[in-house]
Image (cartoon, helix red, strand yellow):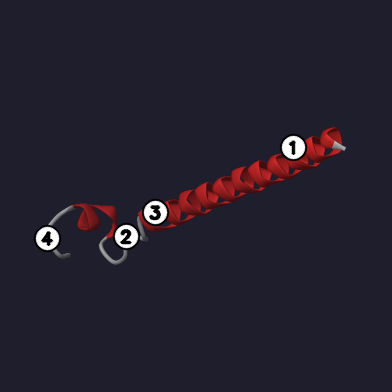
Amino acid sequence: MKKVLVLVAAAAGAAYVKRKVEQQRSEKDLHAATSRMTSTPGPAGPGGAWAAASDRRS
């Protein structure tokens, strides 16, 4: 009987750890996707890349 309880507890612990690892991986992927999305430079607009890189308006 004790062996069965130990096996059930081990299975429950393994399932909990697996769920936590997948949740952390999901949060990491979400963070990476959102940081890529916000740090991507936009189009240069009128004046091209030089106007976007300088302080002067064209």
Q: Quadrant of the N terminus?
A: top right
Q: Are marks 1 and 3 in contact (CB under 8 Å)?
A: no
Residue to which mark 2 is pinned: 44
Separation of marks 2 and 3 at Cα, in angstroms: 12 Å
Helix, strand or loop under label 4: loop
**Mark nearer the viewer, 1 or 3:** 1
Residue at 80% in and 42% down: 8
| Residue in the foreground of this view, choosing between 56 and 24 | 24
| Residue in the foreground of this view, choosing between 21 and 48 | 21
Residue to which mark 3 is pinned: 40
Q: Is residue 49 left or right of residue 40?
A: left
User: Which amino acid lies under the numbered mark 3 shown in the image of this protein?
Assistant: Thr
Residue to which mark 4 is pinned: 56
Separation of marks 3 and 4 at Cα, in angstroms: 22 Å
Which circle's residue, 4 or 2, is located before the other in the chain? 2
Q: Are marks 1 and 4 in contact (CB under 8 Å)?
A: no
User: Which amino acid lies under the numbered mark 1 shown in the image of this protein?
Assistant: Ala
Which circle's residue, 1 or 4, is located before the other in the chain? 1
Say above or below: 38 vs 17: below
Which circle's residue, 1 or 3, is located before the other in the chain? 1
The percent coordinates of residue 48 (x first, y second) are 29, 58
Q: Which mark is residue 10?
A: 1
Separation of marks 4 and 2 at Cα, in angstroms: 13 Å
Q: Which mark is residue 53?
A: none
Separation of marks 1 and 3 at Cα, in angstroms: 45 Å
The percent coordinates of residue 41 (x first, y second) are 35, 55
